[in-house]
Amino acid sequence: MTKNLDRREFLMAATAAGVALTHGSGRAASAADMPALLGGAPVRKGGGGRSWPIVSESDEEAVAEVARTGRWYRNRSVEQFEEEYARLNGAKFCVAVSSGTSALFASLGGLGIGPGDEVIVAPYTFVATVNVALLHYAMPVFADSDRETFLIDPAKIEAVITERTAAIIPVHIGGAPCDMDAILAVAKKRNIPVIEDACQAHLAQYHDRKVGNWGATGCFSFQVSKNLSSGEGGAILTNDEAIAAKCYAFHNNCRKPKVASYDFTYDGGRATNLRMTEFQGALLLSQMKGLAERAETRSANADYLTQMLGEIPGIAPARPCPGATRNAYHLYMFRYDPTEFANMPRSKFIQALGAEGISASGGYGPLNKAAFIQNALNTRPYVRVYGEKAIREWEERNRCPENDKLCEEAVWFTQSMFLGPRSDMDEIAAAVRKLHSHAAQLAKV
Ligand SMILES: Cc1ncc(COP(=O)(O)O)c(C=O)c1O
């Protein structure tokens, strides 16, 4: 619809839609136009988007059926899910596990990562990406973000590689595919495996292939907020049979697939129990039915919103990296520049958006500066393995100035806000425009 409009017409149409939706055509514009934080009418009066998770009768039946059979442990539903999830993503192998954290943990375990190794991680991510390195007593090493894409900057990776580097974990944050060509080129040169953290990136695509299908492994989360969910759950994708077997052994206490309960022969090396239950497998099979359609809806809505937000001074939607062909939009991320909003701080902007009925968040803080990492590094095992000097120098070696700025500028909307009608996007854009045009007044309160 917007294709035939020029930029000005598009903006006017979008504004008119937003205003009409908000206030009805008969009302005086002035009072209604005021930000809700200053006493005006909120742009959105209903909820917008969809409540999450979306529960169907098929979900209820799937879980009830597992309950009835008494086969509550890893069984046919989990195996069927593994087959279907591998097929959906074009990967040869899938190992279902108990969470996204487990998927990353088992990937590192399967690749034999351990004390003395360094693991390069993206700093703009959920804490689990770093925790899994620490759980293996590996040293996390941060490569700075590209602020425009919110993703690890491939140009920063090479500089932090050492002879200890044993893995690189790029994160397709928010569902935005990383620049895998550039990342894999650096990794291949040094023969370092890449573990994709695709925990937020179900069905996201890079060139003609799904993400999670480019590195040695790709890791997914099915925690309840995720675009595909079973409350908790995770999966590892790989195209390498040996890696699949090692990850499987790691997650299954060194036991092979389909061993009889009383077969106590073991395979692999260090291991634990990270198995998915049959309830999760059955629920995922049911939830997968709506996955592709919901992905389409999010994409269409997000693209439409990007056209509108991109026109507002001080709002910079995350830029796709070269080669990214589909964003999963687990998060809709943009940068907010307060200087274009009369120096209204981001926290006030988010508060004012909330008053308009549009919930937003400021997202992650700078993970490389989090005290828990220093606490972990200053424990006896780390000091013994890496030495006091390396631990003392860690902070300086892991500065990420671009990511620091990104953490101050970022604003997020969540995926379920993109599952409603297109008019929801008009409301979001209308709210942001309203805050922009009243920024000076808002900044004073
Ligand atoms: C980027 C990222 N990595 C890892 C994880 C960990 O997944 P889970 O919560 O399923 O353990 C998450 C989940 O929030 C995530 O967003």
Image (tube, rainbow, N blue to C red):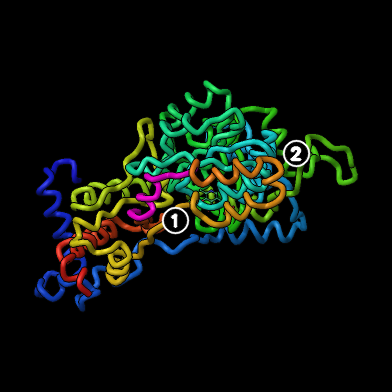
Q: Label 2: few (<14), some or many (≥20) within 10 Å?
A: many
Stretch of the chain drawn in magenta: 398-410
Left or right: 361 in relation to 422:
right
SS assignment at label 1: loop
Q: Of label 2 and label 1, which has the lower sequence position?
A: 2
Give the residue at mark 2.
249
Task: Answer above or below: position of 370 versus 356.
Answer: above
Taking depth in this image into account, of 159 and 87 the one nearest to the observer is 159
Is the CB–ligand 1 distance for label 2 below 8 Å?
no
SS assignment at label 2: helix
Q: Residue at x 52, y 26 (%)?
A: 187
Magenta residues, dominant SS class: helix
Considering every residue shown, the one lying at the far top of the view is: 189
Q: Tell me if residue 401 is in the magenta stretch.
A: yes
Left or right: 406 in relation to 291:
left
Give the residue at mark 1.
365
Q: Is residue 70 visible?
A: yes
The amino acid on which the numbered mark 1 sits, given as a three-letter code, is Gly
Task: Answer above or below: position of 157 versus 20.
Answer: above
Left or right: 252 in relation to 359:
right
Q: Residue at x 43, y 34 (%)?
A: 156
Q: Position of residue 183 (x, y in %)?
A: 47, 30
Q: Quadrant of the C terminus?
A: bottom left
Foreground label between 2 and 1: 1
Q: Position of residue 239 (x, y in %)?
A: 60, 28
Q: Label 1: few (<14), some or many (≥20) within 10 Å?
A: some
Q: Tell me if residue 404 is in the magenta stretch.
A: yes
Q: Residue at x 39, y 45 (%)?
A: 401
Considering every residue shown, the one lying at the far bottom of the view is: 39
The amino acid on which the numbered mark 2 sits, given as a three-letter code, is Ala
